[in-house]
Amino acid sequence: MSIQQLYSEAQQLSTAKLRDDIVQRLYERSHRLCREGIKYTESRRDTRTEKLDAIFTSPIFGFPIMLTMLGVLFYLTIAGANIPSSMLAEFFGSLEIYLSAFFTFIQAPDWVHGVLVLGLYRGTTWVISVMLPPMAIFFPTFALLENYGYLPRVAFNMDRLFKRVGAHGKQSLTMAMGFGCNAAAVISTRIIESPRERMLAILTNNFVPCNGRWGTLIVLASLFMAANFTGGLKSLVTTGVIVGIVMFGIIVTFFVSWVLSKTALKGVPTHYTLELPPYRKPKIFDTVVRSSLTKSWSVLMRAVKVAAPAAILTWVFANIFIGDTSILMYAVEFLDPFGKLLGLDGYIMMAFILGLPANEIVLPILLMGYLSTGSLTEVDSLVDLKQIFLDHGWTWLTALNMMLFSLLHYPCGTTLLNIYKETKSKKWTFLAFLIPTVIAILVPLIITQTVRFFGWL
Amino acid sequence: MSIPKIIKLVNGEKGNLIRITSLNLDGVMRRRLLDLGFVAGAIVEVIRKSPLGDPIAFRVSQTTIALRKEESSRIEGVLMTDGE
Amino acid sequence: MGNSYRVALAGNPNTGKSTLFNALTGLRQHTGNWAGKTVSLAQGNVLYKDKTFNLIDLPGTYSLFSNSNDEEVARNYIVFEKPDVTVVVLDATSLERNFNLALQVLEMTKNVIICINLIDVAEKQGININERILTNRLGVPVIKISARNKKGFPMLLDTIDRIVTGAIECVPVQTTYPDDIEEQIKNIEPKVSELIGNRLSARWVSLRLLDGDEKLLNEISKRFGQKEGSE
């Protein structure tokens, strides 16, 4: 007799309510074990958790506290990362001088120096100095909130909003994670047990700008949107524009979730339960060390793995000439008409394409193109930076479109790789690429054509 | 207390204790609820509502679990006490 | 290696299972506060006396009825990979729900340790656990620890050691079900026994077949179908 035959025999014996009876009996026994083996002397209740929940999930304070926490998390990340980032950049910069000297000393051909130092070294260290400090702050802080038990409360508070569009409250957490890094956030969607809601969270995570895009957004907002303001008002306007962009990303997230849950993901089984564990003081030192070492480090390593080849490729593109035009320039000219249609230009399109491996390098590639330096370039002052943009015909519309394109466009290479690993499906990975790309093209297209039609510019 | 009052979990008020009598769900959701302790005979306490009214958090087998109204409206039980 | 043993860690989410794993192995791994955090199984070694314990951190699950991928991973590891010892980590402040999982593990395998974590928190809340009574009722060792404060580790390691050396014998006390179910089990258990020998607990497999666990059915046909030839 085979196991299959046994199975059908068992199924004939069995009744529909067998599972209920089994679990019920297990719980009865659990209950009895607790009664016999455990004495509850004082109050049985965890009053601390109840008191904290009364605050954190309160109808009045719940949402303000949540927004404050998110704000503090961002502030710590952005403000705290500034100094170490520039220190790292400076360190790598001074090291580069010695490296170049070494290459001259061994009389290496120019192209070797170009590929290895100006391409590989400069590109990779750029990514490291931009990415490492924010991640070393963001992930441990996030992990502390997580280990303390606060995050499930956010999911509890937010669930109603997400339910409207067919998504799961825990998506609010994976989105918050996305502000740090979309690639890590895609992995974090594992917390959503229900397959349909998890897929929604994966496919839309890209619409929250990760830390690699923050830089671009902040620079452009302060250069073009808040240009006519000074002092405190300037940073207020910049912040306002950024908040607006983030809100727009969230609206797109909800819209895309809603459409997908009514179309491609219709009928996929869904279920919802959320445990609210007791609040527990995390081991602060352990948590910080562990999350810095594991998460920040592993995300960084993967980013470097994709950034390194991209850095080489970019250099090669910019430095191999056919006739007197580099491959890069051919591509820029080819893309220019399309870019212009979206209110962008060929350089910007090229920067986003070459920036696929990591969003951090989009702006440096763009500058490299504009200045035709042939290697990634940093500009020391923001005034110079603005002049470069203006020289290439930028207006506030170009800046707005680039910000929107950056917010909405396809996920970076690492994120796409993780989406493939998590979904194990080429189809869904392709959709995760296609949906944002289409939206990122449509939105600037509509805006640009509208503005031009009404002659606002 | 003479006539047992049967209510749905979703209609419970904060502090209510409800002894579960039936789960009107099938499939994965039913099995998951069973695993979490929502079994016939179990006593559930209504803990609190989310700021937007849904989901609702329940105390069951010494843990706090939040359910949406889609699920909590399909679980019925006997109302044991009114919250003090 | 002759004196290397595999020890699987099972348990509900939020029980501090990963904290225990990290504290014992020193392996740098992030601990989560919600379900399904550790999907790819993390492993790490603990040296104790002359032995190496290879710890495997199974996904945190509420049960092992294979409702989800995580549950299937944990279940398959315990049943088919046959760790030398399975440690079930329980949260001392919510034992009722946690025992549900522990009782399921006791049906699947023999060498089990019930490890009650967060004992410091429980004591503060006035929860006094009598591990002797529980050991007696369950037929396997029950140990109280606080993974956070690294309390109770010597006892836990010593118990693992004594199980693998055979100094302690575990005799899990099985859950008895309502008469009609017991009747059905009695009906098919001998046939299951005949088919799978003592590779799995026949009582448990019978119960799963009655419950309509197709995933287990496929797993058995896949694993034992192939093994027959190669062994």
Image (cartoon, grey):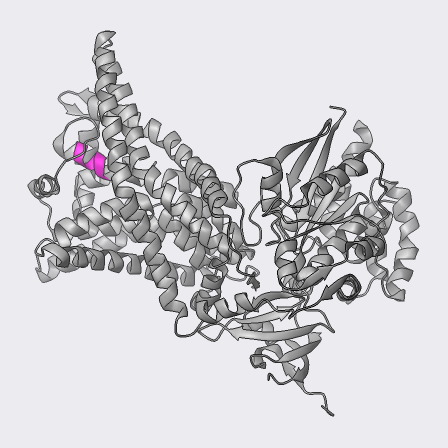
Residue depicted at x 47% and y 62% = A155
In the rendered image, residue A455, in percent from the top left (x then y), is placed at 8, 60
The residue nearer to you, when weighing C157 against B72, is C157
Q: Residue C195 is drawn in which quadrant?
A: top right
* Looking at the image, residue C170 lies above or below residue A98: below
* Left or right: C81, with A242 as reference point: right
* Looking at the image, residue A204 lies above or below residue A166: above
**Residue A171 is one of the magenta-drawn residues:** no
In the rendered image, residue A272, in percent from the top left (x then y), is placed at 56, 64
Dominant SS of magenta comes to helix
Residue depicted at x 88% and y 57% = C185
* Left or right: A369, with A52 as reference point: left
In the rendered image, residue A435, in percent from the top left (x then y), is placed at 37, 51
In the rendered image, residue A225, in percent from the top left (x then y), is placed at 14, 55
Q: Which residues are magenta?
A: A363-368
Q: Could you tell me how many numbered marks the image carries?
A: 0
The residue nearer to you, when weighing A362 against C226, is A362
* Left or right: A135, with B3 as reference point: left
Quadrant where the C terminus of chain C is found in the figure: top right
**Residue A366 is one of the magenta-drawn residues:** yes
For residue C157, say whether it is visible.
yes
* Looking at the image, residue B19 lies above or below residue A195: below
Farthest residue, direction bottom: B2
The residue nearer to you, when weighing A39 against A20, is A39
* Looking at the image, residue A379 lies above or below residue A114: below
Q: Residue A232 is drawn in which quadrant?
A: bottom left
Quadrant where the N terminus of chain C is found in the figure: top right
